[in-house]
Image (cartoon, rainbow, N blue to C red):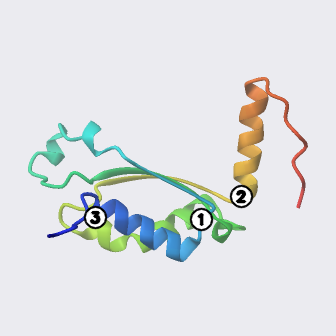
Amino acid sequence: MSTQSRTPVEDAMRLKITQALNPTNLEIYNDSGMHAHHKAMKDSVSKETHFRLVITSEAFRSKMQPARHRMVYALLKEELERAGGIHALQLRTRTPEEEAKLEAQEKAERGEHVADVEQR
């Protein structure tokens, strides 16, 4: 009996990103269903073409967003180039400190008490 994955592209992305970037947070959203009606997707047999990724990793420290995105594109080169592969990829790349700062800001906006964030 075959145990082939129903999400091979997502599984490959998760494995490659986890191994290369050791993220403290990795969120993968498959938005393909929202784009299935687009003309460019008419003949696509893949259900894994549009993704949003949120990646938090120390590997991004001291790198600007374009360099971070190039790192991810290089990791997913095969999935991006494959026929029926990734058609659109939205990235949010952060360091752990950037994520902590963002979370504190969101709590403050909701009116929640925010403990002082330790400076490193």
- Viewer-side residue, 112 vs 50: 112
Which residue, given by chain and number where applicable, does mark 1 sit on?
23
Are there few (<14), some (14-19), or many (20+) residues within 10 Å of tag 2?
A: some
Label 1 to label 2: alpha-carbon separation: 9 Å
Left-right relation of 106 to 66: right
Q: Residue at x 12, y 54 (%)?
A: 45
Q: Earlier in the sequence, mark 3 or mark 1?
A: 3
Residue lying farthest bottom?
20
Visible in this render: residue 73?
no
Q: Hey, which quadrant is residue 89 in on the image? A: bottom left
> Secondary structure under badge 3?
helix
Q: Residue at x 15, y 41 (%)?
A: 39
Visible in this render: residue 63?
yes
- Residue 21: x %, y % from top left: 57, 71
- Residue 8: x %, y % from top left: 28, 64
- Residue 77: x %, y % from top left: 36, 72
Which residue, given by chain and number where applicable, does mark 2 sit on?
96
Q: Residue at x 43, y 71 (%)?
A: 15
In which quadrant will I find the C terminus?
bottom right
The amino acid type of the residue labelled 3 equals Pro
Which residue, given by chain and number where applicable, does mark 3 sit on?
8
Q: Earlier in the sequence, mark 1 or mark 2?
A: 1
Q: Residue at x 37, y 51 (%)?
A: 51
Q: In the figure, 78 relative to 95: above or below?
A: below
